[in-house]
Amino acid sequence: MTDLSRATALLTIDVGAVVANWKRLSALVAPAEAAAVVKADCYGLGMAHIAPALFAAGCRSFFVACVEEGIALRRCVPGAMIHVLNGPLGGDEAEFAAHGLIPVLNSLAQITGWSSFAKKGSGAPAVAVHIDTGMNRLGLSEPELERLAAKPEILAAMRPILVMSHLACADDSDSPLNARQLTTLRRLASHLPALPQSIAASSGIFLGRGFHLGLVRPGAALYGLNPMPGRPNPMSQVIKLQGKIVQVRDVDSPMTVGYGATHRVEGKRKLAIVAVGYADGWFRSLSNRGHGMIGGMKVPVVGRVSMDLTTFDVTDVPVEHAHPGGLIELIGPGHGPDHVAEEADTIGYEILTALGRRHHRRWTGAEGAAS
Amino acid sequence: MTDLSRATALLTIDVGAVVANWKRLSALVAPAEAAAVVKADCYGLGMAHIAPALFAAGCRSFFVACVEEGIALRRCVPGAMIHVLNGPLGGDEAEFAAHGLIPVLNSLAQITGWSSFAKKGSGAPAVAVHIDTGMNRLGLSEPELERLAAKPEILAAMRPILVMSHLACADDSDSPLNARQLTTLRRLASHLPALPQSIAASSGIFLGRGFHLGLVRPGAALYGLNPMPGRPNPMSQVIKLQGKIVQVRDVDSPMTVGYGATHRVEGKRKLAIVAVGYADGWFRSLSNRGHGMIGGMKVPVVGRVSMDLTTFDVTDVPVEHAHPGGLIELIGPGHGPDHVAEEADTIGYEILTALGRRHHRRWTGAEGAAS
């Protein structure tokens, strides 16, 4: 969208804050390397705007989920190391080679498939090996690693540059699984050649230096989500979402509001109808539970969030703020994505990745990002 | 996405089924006109593919939410009547004129603003007037209508072609609000010139002929959602979503699965990890609750849905189906969006509008749509 006057909502993304977050983490983990996880279009915030700024700030290793994202990222950061977490899905190996993407190999089947592919080419392409240490999602199991170690010719066709694993409970620093996974990684990695290791994503970084190993893979923390739920957020906030008021409605007799008549107004109230709904990623689960901010005041969502509209009770807000064409802040510094997520009964990650396509998006702070 | 081999998921949209649904509703409501609600990119299914097929089938009136959508729709269906439900938001009136968009005017403020704008131009542009009859969202209130009736010069600058309202509880045929809103519309419309009226969206159509008036505005029903929750769905299913299996994991000792270790495997199980997660609109609320279909069998989501991956228990599925590169049906004919919505604790509408951008999308059936 190009014209603010016709926008229904304004999403401001502070690229400078993303870069500042990366720099803070990079300094925290040095001499370990800080990569950047930019999958899902930088958690919905715009890879094409953010990845080049991170590269300019010194970030050299990036992680995406799938090969399509890797191809798009290659256009943004020609000189970066791009890891593709899914690895090859069968038939797309040539895409990895063509775009210089590093597959994360998650199973013996992926490794042997890649080995066959690599033997047909020249040189030994770089790969990362993913070991499962207790997540039971992607990654090689111990029996697979033993079988791999027994056939060194499989890995001979490629050049492993990283061994990685993934913590299941990193956001709970009390979980005994964290230390157990770290120990398991060290033990299982002995089946492979000596390589830089990585186990920590955003939350894992804050479990302590022992988890930093050779490389850390922050994603959420770069985008301002709190890597330590329940404790003060050490990261800078990145996004602000403002929805435009379509209509302000005065109600003075008892009546219900919205679909399903789930909210009842008893006395004189003033309602602001905002042009943002669940089709914009403003979750329907915020119905009668979410909040916005306007003129420094917190205003509640009343009634059900509908597809394109949400109603707020703005009775106590001065008219100079609550008027048609005005803006209600739905997500912002004092009311960040983690907070909205609590109200929507999910996590901040899902609030970010759901951010809608109808928002007028504005990226700020990128110019100073590389300094 | 252009190459299926590198796709993480395949979303098939049966445009022919959308057109068949529109034709069925059109026949049901005749001689009333059946419009099509195509806002939010046809509820996430692709306006550029669907709107022209509907136009070719005879649909002439379309509804979108905002002016940006109207401009995009004008490119798809040059000859259509395009209503913009938000109406002008201040400063964007010229866009309506430039693209031949019909504003739905929702408040006295919007009407007077539009009147001032229209007086500057030549001719009297077509508008729709939205009356609130109990939804308390957008629409003129009775006091506003009285003030408007007292100043006929305001409407003189424009050409009202439709008066509309919106039912709050149409999906509950027992709600007394339905008949009350219809009566209120008829009473309040008397403040305006005699015009075609509209109150029914998808569910409203099935409340009976009295609700059809001059025009009905189906959206959800076109896209296969059930307009009569709790009763058999009269509409054809439109979408199928298949996610690709990245890895199949054999587990044979007790362990937990996924983030937060929320699912515990006790015996020998087989898990399939699929490359679809909440960043693709496969809601995190499906964690430990959702299902997929593979080889004719229903398979449960185990553990938490993560951003790019979901794990299914495929222990009982023959290996010829559950293998890396194979597909698990996440949404399909026997497991439609309404059903997935129940498991995700929302409504089918939100399942559709959240459908992700990483899916490889395929539109079928459009060729026969105009017949």
Image (cartoon, coloured by chain):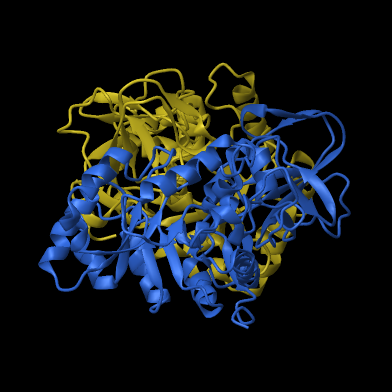
Chain colours: A blue, B yellow
**x 74%, y 41%: residue:** B141
* Whether residue B240 is visible: no
Residue B91 location, x and y as percent? Answer: 66, 69
x, y (%) of residue B261? 50, 32
**Does residue B352 appear in the picture of this structure?**
yes
| Residue B267 placement (x, y as % from top left) | 35, 20
Pick the front one: B304 or B9? B304
Q: Is residue B7 left or right of residue A320?
A: left
Left/right of residue B328 with respect to residue A319 in the rendered view: left
Q: Is residue B106 left or right of residue B273?
A: right
Tally the marks. 0
Q: State which quadrant residue B206 falls in.
A: top left
User: Residue A3 is drawn in which quadrant?
Assistant: bottom right
Which quarter shows the C terminus of chain A?
Answer: bottom right
Q: Which residue occupies 21% across, 55% down?
A: B5
In-front residue for pair B275/A340: B275
- Viewer-nearest residue: B125 or B4: B4
Question: Is B257 in front, or is A319?
Answer: B257
Q: Position of residue A114 (x, y in %)?
A: 20, 57
